Image (tube, rainbow, N blue to C red):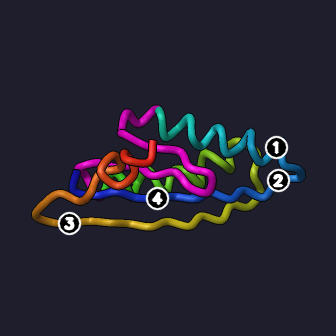
Amino acid sequence: MTASIAIQVLPEAPNNQELCRIVDEVIAYLDSTGLHYQVGAFETTLEGDDYDQLMDIAKECQHVAVRAGAKKVSAYIKVVYQVDGPVLTIDEKTGKYR
């Protein structure tokens, strides 16, 4: 892996049930990308070899939330990118805690 992102999508929703439904749609979209990811309590981490693809996916998460009914979406994104070598994978970072 040469890049990984952590994304927290916070849709505006009238209640927690609706918020979770919208976030579930975003996670389903992330699953559909075929990339390795891990859902956490506050954010989802996604990794891959194509930095631009990861950035496009992060952008699309906001569109997915809006299509799911959110009128406003905040997103917090962390990025690790290394041009000429691998970054630590999700499993290397958290595997020992599972």
Mark carried by residue 18: 1
- Mark 4, residue position: 6
Residue count near mark 1 (Cα–Cα under 10 Å), binned few <14, some 14–19, many ≥20:
some
In the image, what residue type sits under mark 3? Gln
Residue count near mark 3 (Cα–Cα under 10 Å), binned few <14, some 14–19, many ≥20:
few
Q: Is there CB contact under 8 Å for labels 1 and 2?
A: yes
Residue pictured at 65% horizontal, 65% vertical: 74
In the image, what residue type sits under mark 1? Glu
What x and y, as percent, mark residue 76?
56, 67
Say what secondary structure mark 3 lies in: loop
What x and y, as percent, mark residue 34?
37, 33
- Mark 3, residue position: 82
Q: Earlier in the sequence, mark 2 or mark 4?
A: 4
Residue pictured at 68% horizontal, 59% vertical: 10
Mark carried by residue 13: 2
In the image, what residue type sits under mark 2? Ala
Mark in the foreground, 1 or 4: 4
Say what secondary structure mark 1 lies in: helix
Residue 33 highlighted magenta (yes or no): yes
Residue pictured at 34% horizontal, 57% vertical: 4
Q: Earlier in the sequence, mark 4 or mark 3?
A: 4
Say what secondary structure mark 4 lies in: strand
Q: Which residues are magenta?
A: 32-51
What x and y, as percent, mark residue 77?
49, 65
Q: Residue furthest right?
A: 14
- Of residues 20 and 12, the one nearer the viewer is 20
Mark 3 vs mark 2, CA separation in Å: 36 Å
Mark 4 vs mark 3, CA separation in Å: 15 Å
Say what secondary structure mark 2 lies in: loop
In the image, what residue type sits under mark 4? Ala
Q: Is there CB contact under 8 Å for labels 4 and 3?
A: no
